[in-house]
Amino acid sequence: MIAQLVGPLTELAGGWLKGKANAQAANANLKLVEAEAKASIMKNAAMSESEWEKLMAQNANNSWADELYAVIFALPLVLAFAGNWGRDIVQNGFTALDACPDWYKAALGIILSATFASRQATKFFRKK
């Protein structure tokens, strides 16, 4: 009688253990698939950023905008040493820029960021 009960009980326990092992294996496999997917997303994001930087650097070779903006940014520095008339021009210019609407200053910051192909500068202007 006991032998007749032990067989089905062992089968039941074995089935339960097998089910438990299968569930754990499935859970481990799910975690592995999730980790692989996250790694793939991170790799693609890094490659996209790298490709964007490369494209912007290639485009900068054909552009005169960098030089133009460098000259424009150097003008106040030069005028600051040009006596009172130069300092007046610089001060009046910055006062006028300070009075500009915020959307204009933000747009100017974005344009300059894009011109110099600097994603970090773009992020800086977005925070303001």
Image (spheres, helix red, strand yellow):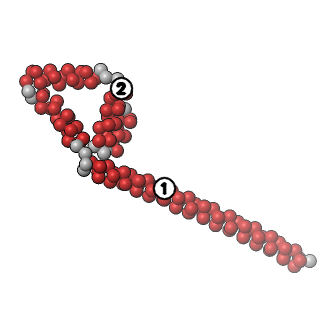
Residue at mark 2: 102
View extreme (left): residue: 83
Question: Where on the picture, by quarter, is residue 118?
Answer: top left
CA neighbours of label 1 inside 10 A, class few (<14), some (14 to 19), many (20+): few
| Residue type indicated by callout 1 | Ile
Task: Residue at the far right: name it.
Answer: 1
Is 121 above or below relative to 102?
below
Q: Is residue 125 left or right of residue 3?
A: left
Q: Residue at x 30, y 45 (%)?
A: 117
Residue 34: percent from left, percent from top: 56, 58
Identity of the residue drawn at 22% across and 37% down: 69
Question: Dot 2: within a 10 Å radius of its alpha carbon, few (fewer than 14), some, or many (20 or more) residues?
Answer: few
Give the numbered dot on residue 122: none
Query: Which residue is more in the foreground, 122 or 62?
Result: 62
Tag 1 residue: 41
Q: Position of residue 96 (x, y in %)?
A: 25, 21
Residue 71 spot, x, y in % from top left: 17, 37
Classify the position of the N terminus by image quarter.
bottom right
Q: Secondary structure at mark 1?
A: helix
Q: Residue furthest bottom?
A: 3
**Rendered position, 120 above or below 48:** above
> Could you tell whether 9 is left or right of 63 in the image?
right
Residue 6 occupies quadrant: bottom right
Q: Hey, what amino acid is under mark 2?
A: Asp
Q: Secondary structure at mark 2?
A: helix
Instruction: From the viewer's side, name the closer residue of 35 and 104.
Output: 104
Q: Position of residue 128 (x, y in %)?
A: 37, 32
Q: Earlier in the sequence, mark 2 or mark 1?
A: 1
